Amino acid sequence: MQTTDKKMFLDMQEHPEKYSDQQIEAMLDELDRVPDVESAWQKFSAEQEESTESTQNHIHTSHRWLKVAASFIGVLLVTGLAYAAFRILSPAKEQQRTEVSTLNSQRSSLNYSPDGFVLFADIRLDSMLAIVSRHYSKTVSFSNEELKGLRIHTKWNQEDSLAAFIGNLNELDELQLTELRDTIFVQKGGVQ
């Protein structure tokens, strides 16, 4: 029954005086007619299938876009991490290369004697302490940048303690070395 027929049927029930007997009979005949259930069911099924396909296509499209977005974010994340690792490790590698080249250029200043001593001849203080501090697993801290460039002539017995080596260098008037925990502190001589 269509919407206009429903309105007319309700209006007939409330105001039968408005309608002729023939109109009332026609309405009752239409109500008595058996509806075509099969065609109504097919129409309903077709509408539901269209709705389901539309929903599935929408869901499939949404999933595809989510996969693309997740892939893009993953690529950006990996790229960012690789870049960060490169930026963090590059200065360390450059410093290591500089240190190695400095030590290689100063190898001529290092002499190993047969009795186990290392002879430092005209070597920069920072280069010498880099070698010694690695041996004792310490770090070096300079109070003054110009101290790094001091040229030193000394010998070092690798079997001696760090305290003995520091005592030997402290005999020089220009330097005052102290050891505190895992660090060797270097100051100008005469500073307490």
Image (cartoon, rainbow, N blue to C red):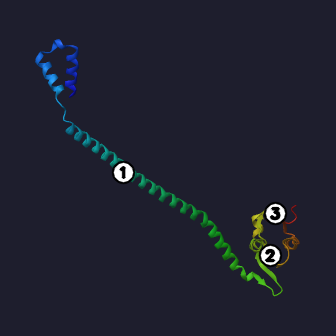
Vertical comparison of 31 with 113: above or below: above
Is residue 25 shown left or right of residue 56? Answer: left
Determine which of the numbered discs, if any, sits on residue 60 in the image.
1
- Of residues 140 and 5, the one nearer the viewer is 5
Q: Secondary structure at mark 3?
A: loop
Image vertical order of residue 150 relative to residue 21, above or below: below
Which residue is label 3 attached to?
A: 181
Which label's residue is closer to the chain start, 2 or 1? 1
Q: Secondary structure at mark 2?
A: strand
The residue that disc 2 covers is 152
Specify few, some or many for label 1: CA neighbours under 10 Å numbering under 14, 14-19, or 20 or more. few
What residue is shown at x 19% (from left), y 24% (from top)?
5
The disc at residue 145 is none
Mark 2 vs mark 3, CA separation in Å = 25 Å
Q: CA distance from mark 2 to mark 1?
A: 75 Å
Q: Amino acid at mark 2?
A: Ile
- The numbered mark, 2 or 3, whose residue comes first in the sequence reads 2
Amino acid on which the number 3 mark rests in the picture: Arg
